[in-house]
Image (cartoon, rainbow, N blue to C red):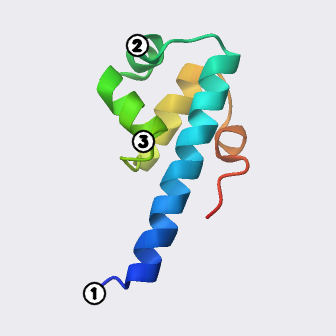
Amino acid sequence: MRIVPRRREEDAAVAAAFGRRLREIRLQRELTQERLAEAAGVHPTFVSNLERGYRVPTLVTLIRMADALEIGLPELLDRVEP
């Protein structure tokens, strides 16, 4: 099954929206990318790539990020739409 280009564009838009939301919350919590990465058990470069919309997190990573930010998944995913 091939993924049509429109779907890829929507996926990229969602990844970018999630990245903006992640950065917004991280900055509200006054955390560096390094501190968030350490608390979530991921590499700082991965956090950077998430924030820039270059990577798409797995469900496990979403849970780790929410825990590290001390918020629930609904708050982390709030306003994340294509």
> How packed is label 3: few (under 14 Cα within 10 Å), some, or many (20 or more)?
few
Label located before the other in sequence (2 or 3): 2
Instruction: Choose mark 2 or mark 3, whichever is in front.
Output: 2
Residue in front for this viewpoint, 18 or 64: 18
Quarter of the figure with the N terminus: bottom left
Identify the amino acid type marked 2: Glu
Quarter of the figure with the C terminus: bottom right
Taking the spot 54% from the left edge, 58% from the top edge, the residue there is: 14
Identify the amino acid type marked 3: Val
Query: Can see residue 42?
Result: no
Taking the spot 42% from the left edge, 42% from the top edge, the residue there is: 60
> How packed is label 1: few (under 14 Cα within 10 Å), some, or many (20 or more)?
few
Could you tell me residue 49's position as x and y percent? 37, 37
Which residue is identified by label 2? Answer: 34
* Left or right: where 79 falls relative to 54: right
Contact (Cβ within 8 Å) of mark 2 with mark 1: no
Instruction: Choose mark 1 or mark 3, whichever is in front.
Output: 1
Asked which quadrant contains residue 29, the reply is top right
Which residue is identified by label 3? Answer: 60
SS for callout 2: helix
Identify the amino acid type marked 1: Arg
Residue in front for this viewpoint, 54 or 56: 54
Taking the spot 72% from the left edge, 47% from the top edge, the residue there is: 78
Between the residue at mark 1 and the residue at mark 3, the CA separation in whole angstroms equals: 26 Å
Which residue is identified by label 1? Answer: 2
